[in-house]
Amino acid sequence: QNAAKQHFSLGYTSFFTGDYDECLPHFTNSITLDPTQPHYWYFRALTQRALGNRGQAQHDALLGVHFEQQLKEKTISMDQKLFRVQGERRTWLEKYRNGLMAFHLVGPRKTKMANEAVRTSGQIDAN
């Protein structure tokens, strides 16, 4: 988990300097090491979106929502982790968080999605 946090920290720094090619592998590594952290998925989603990988961005955002629903802590702590994400990027991400948090994916679909996330967490769409 410590290595996952280190990769996330490096990715986070690169993300806010606009170096998306640099932060993407760090976010991917953090997910590979600890796929249950929603903010890892959210930041990779935002990075994928910035790089024009819309399908992968949506996939990652949905998985972030899934894992956020599993948290024992309140959503406010997730809001604190996302506080620097503002403007249009935050609006895009909140559509996933608010819409799917209210909709609540349930049953086999939810389990299948989580299992797929863990299985494919290190894979990146080349497009």
Image: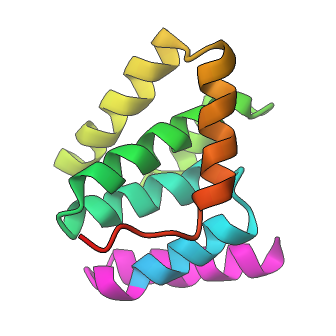
Quarter that holds the N terminus: bottom right
Q: Which residue is more in the foreground, 56 or 72?
A: 56
Is 19 included in the stretch rendered in magenta? Answer: yes
On screen, residue 64 above or below 45 = above
**Residue at position x 52%, y 72% in the image:** 27
- Quadrant of residue 71 within the rendered picture: top right
Q: Bounds of the magenta span?
A: 1-22
Pick the quarter of the image with the C terminus.
bottom left
Q: Nearer the viewer, residue 17 or 116?
A: 116
Q: Position of residue 118 (x, y in %)?
A: 68, 54
In this rendering, would 89 be left or right of 77? left
Coordinates of residue 103 in the picture (x, y in percent)? 47, 11
> Viewed as shown, does residue 81 lie left or right of 93?
right
- Identified at 34% across, 44% down, the residue is 58
The x and y percentages for residue 77 are: 64, 41
Q: Position of residue 29 (x, y in %)?
A: 61, 77
Q: Residue 32 colored magenta?
A: no
Color encoding of the figure? rainbow
Work out whether residue 36 can be spotted.
yes
